[in-house]
Amino acid sequence: MKHFAEYYTTVTSSTNLNEKVTIPLCGSDSICYLDNRFSTRTMIQRARTIAEAHNRFKDQIVGFTINCGDSLSNAREVVSLLMLKDLRS
């Protein structure tokens, strides 16, 4: 089983221009494979570190999930959406 972080961004809602909606990020920055030997807590810390490093150049990642599966299309969520602003201390 492969573990990976899936990153999310926000866009303006198509039904309400004053509302932001969280959607999965697209492209090569949208996922990051994680080492299966790590604990869930360590995977979360690693995913957060990668997101914060990415946001130094292009501030678009707002959160992430940790997923597990044989393939990207056959994966299940292990950790539900964690917002970066909630993880900052």
Image (spheres, grey):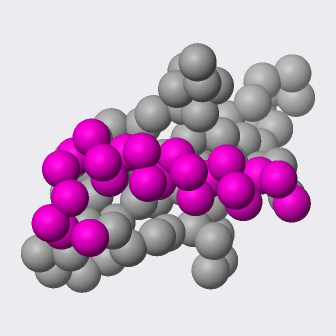
| Most foreground residue, 26 or 45 | 45
Q: Is residue 52 magenta?
A: yes
* Residue 54 image offset from top left, x and y in percent: 72, 60
| Most foreground residue, 59 or 15 | 59
Figure disc tally: 0
Quadrant of image for the C terminus:
top right
Residue 57: image quadrant is bottom right
Horizontal placement of 15 versus 76: left or right?
right
Q: Is residue 26 magenta?
A: no
User: Does the rendering let one see residue 1?
Assistant: yes
54 vs 78: above or below: below
Residue 27: image quadrant is bottom right
86 vs 62: above or below: above
10 vs 50: above or below: above
Q: Residue at position x 28%, y 58% from top? A: 67
Quadrant of image for the N terminus:
bottom left
74 vs 12: above or below: below
Q: Residue at position x 75%, y 30% from top? A: 20
Horizontal placement of 1 versus 78: left or right?
left
* Residue 69 image offset from top left, x and y in percent: 17, 70
* Residue 74 image offset from top left, x and y in percent: 20, 73
Q: Residue at position x 62%, y 80% from top? A: 28
| Most foreground residue, 47 or 79 | 47
- What is the magenta range? 35-57
Principal secondary structure, stretch drawn in magenta: helix
| Most foreground residue, 80 or 11 | 80
Horizontal placement of 55 versus 45: left or right?
right
